[in-house]
Image (cartoon, helix red, strand yellow):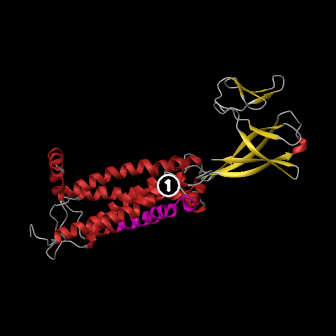
Amino acid sequence: MAGSDHLSRRDFITWITAAVGSLITVVIGLPALDYLIAPALTATSTDAWIPLGKLDSFEVGKPILSTFTRSKVNGWEKTVYSYGVFVLRKSQTEVVAFSNVCTHLGCRVNWQADKKEYVCPCHDGHFNINGQVVSGPPPRPLDTYATKVSGGVLSIHFLES
Amino acid sequence: MAKQLFNWLDEHLGLTDLYKAILDRPEPKGNWWNTLGSASLFLFVMQAVTGIFLTVYYTPSPDHAYDSIQYIMTGVPYGWLIRGIHHWGATLMVLVVFIHMIRVFVTASYKYPRELTWMVGVGLLILTLGMGFTGYLLPWDQKAYWATTVGTSIAGTVPWVGPIIEKALRGGPELSALTLSRFFAAHIWMIPALLVGAIGVHLYLIIKHGESQFPDKQD
């Protein structure tokens, strides 16, 4: 049979076995891969407006720490994370919300009223009242949240990747 | 190029000799009953692969065992399939191994020179049952809990050393987190290691002695 176009029985069996084997590998392999990497393919980003309280309860010109918690479900476990926001009411209508997470390595900053600065206790990063870096290692100003006031209640736009 | 590579590997690894010894060895005329050993081996590999996959999400702690399995069943893509295969494969494996033993007994294949193959095979049956027993606790539901309570109590009825065996199996006087973690260790490390070793000896002996002829009227 050598040299002829005729497909021998042995070659036919070989090809069929290889084809069916490949098909089985794909049919089993893809679900198996999906099973393994599923956590990477699941969308985990959340987006919510968090009410922080009546706008009138925040004193003008003084940053006030407001805290809230968010729970997150990872697989079969639910974890509650707490967040802190410095609300700075600049005027009767204008308001800014800073995250209290230091932009350097993620420690929580504190407002020091005597210095009029947010100070990070970890590596002595200083931010002014508007969140701009004054000194220390932080690479960028404090992060801010988008804000809105409806019915007199201040809310921030919380985004989580 | 591929042929040269194969020849080089063949020269150094002896692939052709291995193929002849393992897959191309002479076989007596048999029937489908002779395939049960291979079926057992296939089921073992299948249980190993699905078991390894299950450990990616399973947590052997009383706080999380049940919830992690619920998550595998409902939250992970194809988790239900992998756990289902492992669950039913376990039952099937006990069945196939047992029928394999009956076949060997009925065809008198355990006789000289295959007595050692039979003895190792008995060990394999016991290890397979051990896998079933330890795996049964891992879902940590009511059925698992009480089945293990009863099973370990039976071990406790052995004269003299019974209470020690019972406590050793449970990791204490009653079922606890220690029971679950030691059953898990036995299920995924200890018994599989023994199984792999015993399967290796079993297969070596089959290749060494070849398969037995079915007895005819003269035997």
Q: Which is more toward the observer, A2 or B40?
A: A2
Counting the numbered discs, the total is 1
Residue B219 lies in quadrant: bottom left
Indicate whether B94 appears above or below A129: below
Instruction: List x then y, in percent, for residue A157.
Output: 74, 48
* Span colored in magenta: B72-98
CA neighbours of label 1 inside 10 A, class few (<14), some (14 to 19), many (20+): some
Residue B161 showing in the rendered view: no
Residue A10 showing in the rendered view: yes
Residue marked by disc 1 = B155
Residue A98 lies in quadrant: top right
Q: Residue at x 18, y 58 (%)?
A: B209
Instruction: List x then y, in percent, for residue B138.
Output: 53, 55
Q: Residue at x 32, y 60 (%)?
A: B41
Instruction: List x then y, in percent, for residue B113.
Output: 18, 58
Q: Which is more toward the observer, A51 or B83?
A: A51
Instruction: List x then y, in percent, for residue A108.
Output: 71, 32
Asked if residue B84 is among those painted magenta in the image, a careful observer would answer yes
The chain letter for the residue carrying disc 1 is: B
Indicate whether A23 appears above or below B185: below
Q: Residue at x 58, y 53 (%)?
A: B65
Helix, strand or loop for the magenta stretch, by majority: helix
Q: Which is more toward the observer, A145 or A51?
A: A145
Please identify the residue farthest to the left as the structure is shown.
A2
Please identify the residue farthest to the bottom as the structure is shown.
B217
Q: Secondary structure at mark 1?
A: helix
User: Does residue B104 appear left or right of residue B55 in this picture?
Assistant: left
Indicate whether A117 appears above or below A71: above
Residue type at mark 1: give it.
Ala
Asked if residue B78 is among those painted magenta in the image, a careful observer would answer yes
